[in-house]
Every structure is written in C-alpha cells, then in structure tokens.
Image (cartoon, helix red, strand yellow):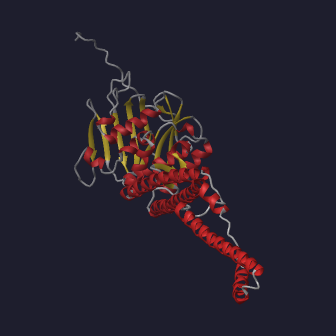
Amino acid sequence: MSIKINKLEIENVKRVKAVKVEPTANGLTVIGGKNNQGKTSVLDAICWALGGEKYRPSQPQRDGSVIPPNLHLVMSNDLVIERKGKNSDLKVIDPTGKKGGQQLLNEFVEQLALDLPKFMQATNKEKANTLLQIIGVGAQLHELERQETNIYNRRHAIGQIADQKAKFAKEMPYYPDAPKEPVSASDLIKQQQEILARNGENQRKRQNLQALETQADNIQRQIDELLSKQKIILADLEIARKSALDLHDESTAELEENINNIEAINIKVRANLDKDKAEEDALEYSNQYNTLTAELNKVRQAKIDLLNSADLPLPGLSVVDGELTYNGYKWDNMSGSDQLKVSVAIVRRLNPKCGFVLLDKLEQMDLDTLQEFGAWLEQEGLQAIATRVSTGDECSIVISDGYVVGAEKPAEPEAPKWKAGEF
C-alpha cells in the first residue's frame, strides 16, 4: 500500500509564514498564488521534512521571523514527522512503536518524488536506463541492442561493397560477339596446318591428273603403237577424273584472320569473363546484405516483443535506440504534460510505497490539460502536490504573502524590546 501525505503544517520556512494544507488523497492538489508569495517554499519544506538534511534550504528561517521553522506532517500510515526548534531536528513519531528517524522515512520516500526535475533534466539515455531498471529487462535489451549494432555495422559494410561491385561491373566493357573462352594460338595454327595438308594432297591429286592427261595425249598420238596400254590408262584416267570432281579446297582465311586477331579476341573474352565475375560478386554481396537485413529485423522484433511483454509503468512507454519514448515520441517531442505524466509514472514505480510526488510550476499546463492530468492521477491512485502561478478556481489553496488566502492568520509574536548590554 502506497503512503501519502494527509496533513501538513508549515511555519516560518523561507517565504512561508503559516500554511496548513490537507492534500487530496488521490489526484492533484494545486497551490496557487502570484510570484514570490511562498508557493515553492511549501514544496521545499516538504522536501526538507521528508528527504533529510540534503534538502535543507541554505536559509530555512523566514526573513524577519524570530521563531525558528516549524514543520509538521501526518502521513497516511499515521506516521508523524516534525522539524522544529532552534536546530530543526527531525522527529519521527510512529504509532506502531517502530523506532527510526530518516532511515524509516527512506523506506517509503522516493528521492525523485521530491526532486522530479532531477529525473526530467536527466539525459534521454539516463531516463531510458531508469525505466529499464525498474521493468527488469535492461540486460536483455542491452544484449539485443549490441547484436543489432553488430549486424547493422556488418550489413552496412556489405552494402557498401555490394554497391561498389555492382558499379564496377556496370562500368566494365562487354563484347557479345566474343567467344566464351580465350582463343588458343596453337589450336588455330594446328587447324591451319591440317587444312594446308589437305589442300596439299588435293594439289598432288591435281598434278597427277595433269600427268595422266599428258600421257593420254601422248598415247592418243601413239595410239597405233600403244593400243594395249590404252585401256589401262583410260581406266585410270576415268577414275582420276571422278575423284577430282569431289574435291573442294577449304579456305584458311578465317583462321588466318583469327590468328592475326587472336590477342584482340582474347582481350574481349577476358573482359567478358571479368564482367561476369564482377556481376557474380555483386550478386553474392547483395544476397549477404539481404540475409543480414533479415537478421537485423529479427533482432529488432525481439526488442519490440521484449518491451511489449514487460510490465511498463505507463501504456505507450518504450525504449527505442537507447532512448525513452512515449506513444512513439522521444522526450524532446513530448508535450509538457506528457513529460510530467511519464516522469510521475516512472518515479512511482521506482518505489511503489511512495504514493505522492511534488510538482513545481504547473502553469505550463492549460486548464483542460491540468484537469486531464488530475483525472489521470486519480485513476492511478497517486497524490500530487503542485504549484501554479494562478489565483483561479483550479487552485486548491492560494497563498499570498506567506499565508493561505481566507485562512485565519495567527498572531505574530512581537520582536524582543531589549537591547544588548541593557538590563
């Protein structure tokens, strides 16, 4: 059960002369008034009463007062806290008989509830760390963020290489008419030699034909003398003629051109192979980039799932990239009222026993926002004691010149009339 302030009486603290307040148990108690009338002094007095000597004002006693400060608070657990007398020593009265001074108060008083600006002025990462601390997922989120950063950096490097590879491949020349493999000079020369050999055989056969035809002419002239040989020669002649009709010489012009242009061809082939390799490299790095993107999205989803499953102090709260967010907005983009709501919710969760929070300078809220904030406090069962430069109806009490307007003013004691050295 959270502990709240039931009653408070303050006398002669800073600008306060005498103020009595019974804050509403749930919701907003607004202390109004013009500037320099003692509103903030009330909050400072509460901080001092509950927070200890570190909250003691440098000049706690009201200027012009001969009576030392007097603080009297009654808590919802019936604990009574007093500071009075020359030294304003702390006195804690526990109806259950439990003894203890400031140590007893520290059990239920959350320091940030007394000093909310300390939380609100912290860095975005410090606020996020506070939230993660109270929901107990800080270590897990830190590990996921480490993985996310690692994968992101790897993916970024891979992406740069993939872009460079793709750009390099795009700028390289390509020759679609070139062979797929480099041309071998020895193979071309061998093919040329084979053709030349076949052509030489053809030439030999032509020469043989010519010789036979010459012999035939001689035999024709000597027909009377060589009748016995005519049939054989004519038969050979017929065979030679038929064989010659089927002969076709092969051209070596293309091979000669290829031999002459072999280096130029191979330059094109190597260029095409280099371009193919560059495109393969670019595709490989692109695939690696896509794989790392999937891993990165998986880690980010794990972060979202971790925070969604956590017991957050306020719906809409989260941590993104190590910074506190509310309804998707980072701290510097939140409205002033949302910043207060987030701060109060987190501070309350830090010490659930502490059911109150002190808020200074609520004039930043318009009346509708103030009413909405008060309704949220009531719904959450929280007590807030706040100051506002105003004397309107939204104020629970109004302070003027150190007193509550409308309350009976106690008679001020007269200053001593004696002078030093006189009796």
> Looking at the image, which residue sits at the far front?
225
62 left or right of 214?
left
Q: How many marks?
A: 0
For the N terminus, the image quarter is bottom left
Give the quarter of the figure containing the C terminus. top left
Q: In the figure, residue 213 lies in which quadrant?
A: bottom right
Residue 95 x/y as whole percent: 28, 52
Instruction: Name the residue nearer the viewer: 77 or 58.
Output: 58
Q: Nearer the viewer, residue 409 or 239?
A: 239
Front in this rendered view, residue 366 or 156: 156
Question: Is residue 383 visible from the viewing direction of this image?
Answer: no
Which residue is drawn at the image coordinates 30% and 47% (left, top)? 106
Q: Position of residue 183 (x, y in %)?
A: 56, 61
Tell me if residue 264 can be seen.
Answer: yes
Residue 330: x %, y % from top left: 52, 47
Q: Is residue 119 left or right of residue 331?
A: left
Query: In percent of the image, x 63 and y 59: which residue is there?
Result: 256
User: Which of the pair 398/286 is nearer the observer?
Assistant: 286
Report whether 131 appears left or right of 217.
left
Q: Determine whether 183 is above or below 126 in the image.
A: below
Quarter of the rendering containing residue 258? bottom right
Kindly indicate the quadrant of the structure image that contains residue 176: bottom right
Q: Is residue 24 above or below residue 117?
A: below
User: Which residue appears at 41% of the width and 29% of the height?
Assistant: 17
Q: Residue 67's x, y, as percent?
A: 33, 27
